[in-house]
Image (spheres, rainbow, N blue to C red):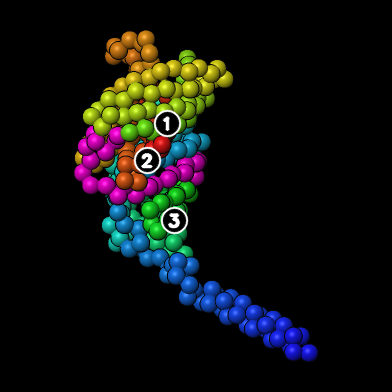
Amino acid sequence: MPGIQLRSMSKRALRAVLAMGALVLSLGFVPGLQAKDGCTNQDFIGVFGFFGTGYVVQSTGTPPVGPFARVGTFVTDGNGNLSFNSTANFNGLIAPFDFLGTYTMDSDCTFTAVLHLTNPFTLDVTFIGGLSEDGNQSRELFTEPPGIVISANGRKQNLGACTNSDLSGPFQLELSGSTLVGTTRLPFAGLGKIDADGAGSFVGKLRSNFGGLSSQENISGTYATAPDCTFQMKYYTAGEGKGPSDGVTLKGVLTDQGNRAFLMVLDPPSAVVLGSLDRR
């Protein structure tokens, strides 16, 4: 019957079209779906803000045992060289920590980095890592020497010389880590929001949980942004004094065109606490 033959031909044509579509997809001819070519060192290039978090389980003779945090910037030149400008907290010991390193990128966009740590601790360490989001994000995991568990996250800044105006508007604030009370280290977490005026002042709210006890407070403070897009901020809770021992001081670094920032508590130094700002 003509109708049956037409339906059969239509099915055959449909199967042919689907088969051709599968072939096109497998060959990567569809715009936006084409697989990225193999990575090289030149795919890892730019200025990144980053944080590192972890724990020194067994000291290699230099870093003290305990929780660890770091925040700062690193620069990759596309030729296998790294330079870091950062501040670290080794179980309550706050120290500037600038160093150099090298990296080797594999075709699958994973890499190995060897960092040559200097003052305050002289040590060569190895990380493995991977790139994603078209080279805008890097993730790293510490592998050598043994006894240290650290992971890190880097985000490309995509910014020029920064001023206070680059930190402006409403942001979600997150904090997590631990701090000492006497000789006991208690966990801490915080979630809130701030509104930065772009001129060095902010107000906000922070809900925190410290050692299992929750509280909510209004906060306010000031910040100063450096040309390298790092900044220092200090906040006080409502009704708190503003003497030398009052308030909480943090170091931050802007990323993602100013839409995100990584944070680390500087004072009190016993608080090994990291955090983030994300534009609302």
Kind of residue sitting beneath label 2: Arg
Q: Secondary structure at mark 3?
A: strand
Q: CA distance from mark 2 to mark 1?
A: 10 Å
Please say if 255 is above or below 107: above
Identify the residue shown where x is 38% and y is 57%: 135
User: Which image quadrant for residue 193?
Assistant: top left
Q: Earlier in the sequence, mark 2 or mark 1?
A: 1
Instruction: Give the crowd class for mark 2: few <14, some 14-19, many >=20 residues within 10 Å.
Output: many
Instruction: Give the crowd class for mark 1: few <14, some 14-19, many >=20 residues within 10 Å.
Output: many
Instruction: Give the crowd class for mark 3: few <14, some 14-19, many >=20 residues within 10 Å.
Output: few
Q: Earlier in the sequence, mark 3 or mark 2?
A: 3
Residue under label 2, please give it. 260
Picture quarter with the C terminus: top left
Q: CA distance from mark 3 to mark 2?
A: 17 Å
Q: Nearer the viewer, residue 121 or 271?
A: 271
Kind of residue sitting beneath label 1: Leu
Query: Which of the numbered marks, if any, corresponds to residue 173?
Result: 1
Q: Are marks 3 and 2 in contact (CB under 8 Å)?
A: no
Q: Nearer the viewer, mark 1 or mark 3?
A: 1
Q: Which residues are magenta?
A: 144-168
Kind of residue sitting beneath label 3: Ser
User: Which image quadrant for residue 240?
Assistant: top left
